[in-house]
Image: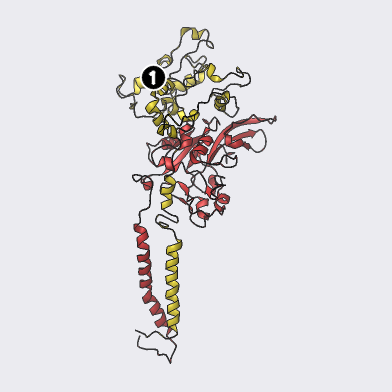
Chain colours: A red, B yellow
Amino acid sequence: MEETPTNSTPEMPRRDFLGACLRTLPTVVAVAIVVDSGRLLADDTDGDPGYKPEEHSYGMGVDIHKCIGCGRCAEACKRENDVPREPIFFRTWVERYAVPAEGEARVDSPNGGIDGFRPYDDDTETIRTFFVPKLCNHCENAPCVQVCPVGATFQSPDGVVLVDANYCVGCRYCIQACPYGARYLHPEKKVADKCTFCYHRITKGALPACVEVCPTQARVFGEVGPRSSPLHRFLRFNDCTTLKSWLNTKPKVFYAGAGDEVR
Amino acid sequence: MARIPQQMIPVGIIGVLLLATFIIARQIFVPETFGELGHYRAAAIGEVAAQPAVYAGFAVCLECHEDVYLHKQTSSHTGLACETCHGPAAAHAQAPDEALPTVPRGREHCELCHSYNAARPSGFPQILADRHNPGDPCITCHDAHAPRMPIAEGDCGACHGEIAHQKAVSKHARLECTQCHVVPAEHFTNPRTVAAARPQARDVCGACHARGADSSREIPRIDLDTHGGRYNCWDCHYPHLPEA
């Protein structure tokens, strides 16, 4: 501080320059905080004002022993959420697995199971066969959320993975990243779309449409945490697995009775 | 305090301008509520939640159609929501006379669940559609709201060995089969034609397990009105082997 550089001596000692930089830093931070504070105070939700997302943690149980493959869940989902009718767009769908005597399991899902399943027209010896309803697994560690370049897909405080349709740029990166094939690009909106656990229903205390219409209660919806929740009970009384657990995505859709061939 | 050298003044101005541009650009391009809860727009949660519902839920149907509901409760279709067959009914609940839900009358609707498919659970009632009165709508013989099961599950381990074995080690071991099942005498001589009856309503369990039931004190109690909603007891609890 004792040396005072002049115009004729253009060199400023490095120590002074760094010191000056440090002294201005608080000002920059202060400006940034003031600019940001308005946004922190802003009121956000236009949904149900009594609903507190941070108090919930949702999950689903699927009992493969109970599924009869009627496809009412896939149909109800399409109607509830205005999913395009083309047989390539689904938020939930039913797969039929057939485990042959030798080789890999056969998996098919004609129109997501909505129109039913025809018997196989060949004579492959089948050891066992069953239906597996599929949907977004609402992973705690979701690959789709990690790869979204703009922050348009995210996990809400209640553990539901959602898509911000007004912010998605339609780059399809999340569709590539999802190991469960649970996402598709909406052909009209040109944004990624997926199961929301019927977020508009569950936040008002109703069940997701697929759970509502399931005739055999093969789907169980509820909170992951409290012991009183139907899902907790489902997990206590069934040996549950998650799909592709080795990927460490930590799914919140739990399958009872799913063998190794279910992926 | 060191005097700022002259050549640093334009650099400083440029720096301030860049900072100002960055702050303004950030204000413009970063949407409101972005980053409040995480790396996303917090307002998107409310936007997703604001989507209108299309399915009303069975409790809404119950408000007007309690008669059908009670009729349905007497059968194995008790766990079915109305909208499973009749389609979404939120619009119907809003304007009952204008938006009518669908009434599926064809065979193909029932066959979605009840035509034989090897992948279905083996106990589920299924028919071979091309041999089972082909061409006739199912509703000519069956009441869709309260269909009757032709299969009997009755008394006695001689025929029902698996159930008898499970029951023998359960809390219900000392109950007679006839505690819950009505078994006509002829069922023993003619089991296929004269069926024993399955319990059809929650009251059967309620006779012992309802809060006000006149039964032994160590029997667990539930409130029939609030416990379980539209489901029957045996949708969750297996009566032949209830959990301890």
Residue designated by label 1: B204
Q: Judge whether B112 appears above or below A203 on screen.
A: above
- Residue A112 in the image, given as x and y percentages of width and height: 58, 37
- In which quadrant is the C terminus of chain A drawn? top right
B23 or B75: nearer the viewer: B23
Left or right of residue A191: residue B244: left
Question: Residue B150 location in percent, x, y?
Answer: 52, 16
Q: Is A70 left or right of B178, judged from the image as shown?
A: right
Residue A185 seen from this side: no
The relative height of residue A72 versus residue A25 in the rendered view (above or below) is above
Q: Quarter-wise, where is residue A111 in the image?
A: top right
* Picture quarter with the N terminus of chain A: bottom left
The answer to which quarter of the image holds residue B114 is top right
Amino acid type for the residue under numbered disc 1: Val
A39, above or below A77, in the image? below
Question: Does dot 1 land on a helix, a strand or a loop?
Answer: helix
Q: Up-down: is A69 above or below A45?
A: above
Most foreground residue, B121 or B22: B22
Q: Is residue B109 visible?
A: yes
Letter of the chain that mark 1 sits on in the rendering: B
Q: What residue is drawn where x is 54% and y is 44%?
A: A182
Q: Where is residue B144 in the image (x, y as percent from the top left)?
A: 49, 21
Q: Which residue is drawn at 65% across and 31% down?
A: A126
Q: Nearer the viewer, residue A243 or B224?
A: B224
